[in-house]
Image (cartoon, grey):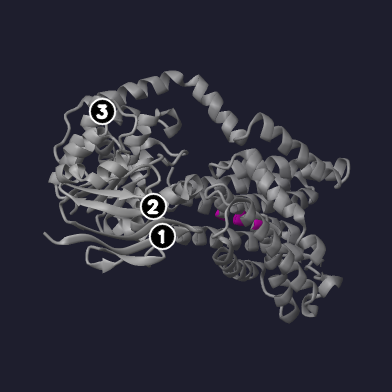
Amino acid sequence: MRTIPFLIVCLAVGAAVFAGAIASGNDYLFFAGYVVMQYIVLATAWNILGGYCGYVNFGTAGFFGIGAYVTVAIHQWHPLPIPLLVVLGGAVSAVIGYGMGYLTLRLRGAFFAIATLALAVVLETLVVNWDYVGGSRGAYIVRPEAIAPFGSYIRYMFMIMMLLAIAALTVARLIERSRLGYGLATIRDDELAAEAAGVPTLRLKLIATTISGALMGMAGAPFPYYIGYLQPDSTFGFDYAVNAIAMSVIGGTTSWVGPLIGAVLLGSLQQLATVTISSAVNLLIVGLLLVFFVIVAPNGILGLIHKYWQHKSDDFVGRRRVDLAAAAAAPAPDGAPGAPP
Amino acid sequence: MSELLEVANLGKRFGGFVALDNIALSVRAGERLGLIGPNGSGKSTLVNCICGTLRNEQGSVRFDGRVIDSLPAHRRTRLGLARSFQLPRPFVSLSLMDNVRIPLLYTVAARGGRHAGAAIDDHCHRLLREVGLEAKAGALPRDLTQVEMRKLELARAMAAEPKLLIADEAMAGLTHSEIEDILALLVRLNEQGVTVILIEHIMRAVMSFSRRLVVLVSGRKIADGPPEEVMRDPEVERAYLGQ
């Protein structure tokens, strides 16, 4: 499917979800849905670096927090419309993402993960000591009661976050099918071999950290208006990092669909648990599901589907092999490749 | 013929261990060079220094008229310096087609040789056919045997359309007829103008392919010349054949 039809389908689904939530007459659905949408953005953003490129980032909360605190800082000066704040928060996070990439991308594996974790801590410390945005006391942001033509403000915020989620999915999908996506996959598989094949690994990794950071910051930018009272401790909380990773891993990291499935599933489950049991159960759910998936389906739900589908379509694969063999038997055009131009 | 590759005073140490000691080597365009030496003599380290996988502490490497010491590996590949790895390093999550597609996308396209999607597909098939892997174009590297992985490694290096191809033990473990196939392939590439450096332990292959033979022992070059002469050299016999 091309990008434009894909966008149209996404927007149609989004419109249906929005209409359904309005029809239910319960504004709480928007509050819960906002969080799920936010996690779609965060998990998708995480997956661009973590899934496609193989660099595990524990700093999701750092980028999310930057987005949120850029909004607070701007709000203290002069309230701006949320879409503009999203762009600004995204821009600042993109710069920080680029900087973080430049400093840490020479590290691999666990060392990279530790460095990104440290980034979140450093950023939190900065905010705690910055009085203008409330410091450790936190910052209050009173959101308007209503906005035309949406009625209540939360509907408006839900729609913004949903559009962001669609944008994030579209970006991830575009990357996946582009030259950049192939390049990131080679970095995940073997960086030395990637370099030898002509892939500019450092540059691609920087592109990935920048895009990933920007999307996370965008997800954070509307957050102060959602939560009303922003506090460094919870904004830079470890939950965001753990959730973004868990959602991607549970859904499957090889495709844009994985984080979407993971975020919708896990995000909804958490919202349900918050209402019915307690919000403290959330991390337990994440932990149990993560353990379950790592043991039973290390490639996530996508991996399970893929396996099932492959099993069912053995016939098709067999025929494909024959086709390729026939192609191989076809007369070869002369002139070996590899000759310099 | 002009010098394509010029290595001067190249030195590389790993801690206190001198892996390469003052290596000088020049290769003319169109040459077929064999590089031999016992295990641990520094052959692969030399290749790594030439291709930018490792940085040499001493000396310099010139390729195609320019000093490339400061260039990262991918820039060297774009200049036309391709290598296969001694231990195959395929992109495990990509199909064979996509494995050879990568150098086409990132090297050939970067040089301005624009390929359209379908043309790239054809090209990938042709490259895999060259090494006898076309029937497995859609398979993943984990479904290959060790021997097939070596062929894939070679196909991927060829895909970068190099001026100089360094084949690092591409034939280890291959059968007699497979060695003949790979040799014929390398000769064909060479006839089209690609300079080839062959690193190999299989002497029959080295002797039939090389027009010039270089011997490394303990990080030093001890011989450089026509293969028959080099093999008669008493120092080579002593060091390399262990006599």
**Kind of element beneath mark 3:** helix
Q: Earlier in the sequence, mark 1 or mark 3?
A: 1
Q: Specify few, some or many for label 2: CA neighbours under 10 Å numbering under 14, 14-19, or 20 or more.
A: many
What distance separates the C-alpha of mark 2 from that of mark 3?
27 Å
Q: Is residue B212 visible?
A: yes
Disc sitting over residue B12 in the figure: 1
Residue B55 place in picture, x, y as percent: 42, 61
Q: Quadrant of the N terminus of chain B?
A: bottom left
Q: Residue furthest right?
A: A277
Magenta span of residues: A161-167
What distance separates the C-alpha of mark 2 from that of mark 1?
8 Å
Residue A112 place in picture, x, y as percent: 61, 56
Q: Specify few, some or many for label 1: CA neighbours under 10 Å numbering under 14, 14-19, or 20 or more.
A: many
The residue that appears at 77% across and 77% down in the rendered structure is A130
Q: Give the residue type that dot 3 points to.
A: Glu
Q: Specify few, some or many for label 3: CA neighbours under 10 Å numbering under 14, 14-19, or 20 or more.
A: some
Q: Residue furthest left?
A: B1
**Kind of element beneath mark 1:** strand
Q: Is residue A263 visible?
A: no
Q: Nearer the viewer, residue B151 or A306?
A: B151
Q: Is residue A166 magenta?
A: yes
**Can you identify the residue that label 3 sits on?**
B178
Q: Chain of mark 2?
A: B
**Can you identify the residue that label 2 sits on?**
B45
CB under 8 Å between discs 2 and 1: yes
Q: Give the residue type that dot 2 points to.
A: Thr
Image: A239 above or below B65: above
